[in-house]
Amino acid sequence: IFAAVEMAPRDPILGLNEAFAADTRAEKVNLGVGVYYDDNGKIPLLGAVRAAEKTRLEAMPPRGYQPIEGPAAYNGAVQNLLFGKGSELATSGQVVTVEALGGTGALKVGADYLKRLLPGASVYISDPSWENHRALFESAGFPVQTYAYYDAATRGVNFAGMKASLEAAPAGSIIVLHACCHNPTGADLSDAQWDEVVAACRNRGLVPFLDMAYQGFADGIDADAVAVRAFSASGLQFFVSSSFSKSFSLYGERVGALSIVTASKEEAGRVLSQVKRVIRTNYSNPPIHGGAIVAAVLNSPELRQQWEDELAGMRDRIRAMRTSLVEQLKAEGVAQDFSFVIKQRGMFSYTGLTAGQVEKLKADFGIYAVSTGRICLAALNSKNIGYVAKAIAQVVKG
Ligand code: LMR
């Protein structure tokens, strides 16, 4: 039965990890995947996570099945982060929140549910978008189109184009929006532009699906929730996938959530019953550990403060790397203006490097980046940034 099976291409992002691991050069640097490393090049175990984990391990709790939707303490904490503690949406019961296997798992549960709810819809993702968005929604059975987003000339958002695309999308289309720290471009909408996107979704009868994998990596927890809050205030129904992979440095624990804003508590009960069927037939119920740690941190005022401080530390270090990279490229004699790197938000820079230049970085220097030219600034540190700047200078100078 396997004789005719074709070799699938490597994943454009996680496939780089495989190639990086196989690279034997000591000076190699992985700027591919969106993972935060500290200044020693290590994935940090946050102090707040360590404290919550210690308490939990000392208690040695039993490992029964979880509710299909995950525990209420976790789902409630997610709602407080997304919609604001004490907000109408966090208290009204009209939001369905289910724990999911990371942000990707949340997107997939949402996509599978949407396929049952709106089987004839199309999905629109930004041009460009996170590589897995298209694959994921296509694998859920949707045709996937793009809406205009990035303007390579200004290195910002082509907002007029974006609005025109949204206004041309058929009613009932599903619009996947990056709530903050756009992946891969790092170019975000302004608050006023978000209000216009909300209005376009309302006017056209579109179904917004906000992907929020980087809350806290641009300006802070509440500031980065501006898109979610704009949709919340609109009274529209919408979906949000969220992730603690980056903000808690819990990548491998697969901790995320899907939230669906419905019109009423009664509606939420019916929607939850359907989403539970999607989960039950996929993985039954979520694993315990990662979600328990996140809930313990978010539900303890002291640990939550510690976590926010640690998150701010990660955010500041990435910003410092942005500035330093721009300075060092200049010092290496690169004529091209790279100052846009400082303005981009989140972990990534859409550098404008061509696929050929990315290939050269890998072949000649052991520096791995996504073929679109996306690099992860959070993998730079005080030891490797000089090497990376030199290498980029060499490839752009040809
Ligand atoms: C990324 O874009 O690198 C991250 O979101 C990791 C992933 O799953 O692709």
Image: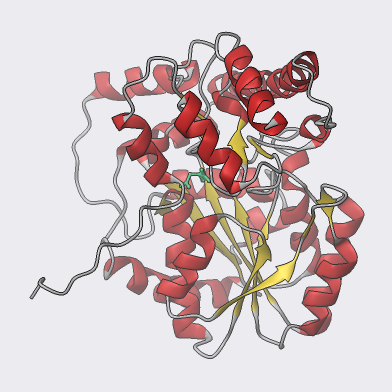
Specify the farthest residue to the bottom. 120
Return the residue nearer the eye: 47 or 314. 314
- Residue 335, compared with residue 177, is above or below; it is above
Q: Is residue 267 left or right of residue 51?
A: right
> Where does the image place residue 367, in percent across and percent down from the top left?
50, 28
Q: Is residue 60 visible?
A: yes
Specify the farthest residue to the front. 398
> Where does the image place residue 203, in percent across and percent down from the top left?
83, 81
- Residue 149, compared with residue 152, is above or below; it is below
Q: Is residue 249 visible?
A: no
Q: Is residue 309 left or right of residue 65?
A: right
Residue at horizontal 78 percent and vertical 39 percent from the top: 223
Residue at horizontal 72 percent and vertical 33 percent from the top: 220
Residue at horizontal 53 percent and vertical 21 percent from the top: 303
Q: Is residue 278 left or right of residue 331?
A: left
> Where does the image place residue 357, in percent across and percent down from the top left?
60, 39
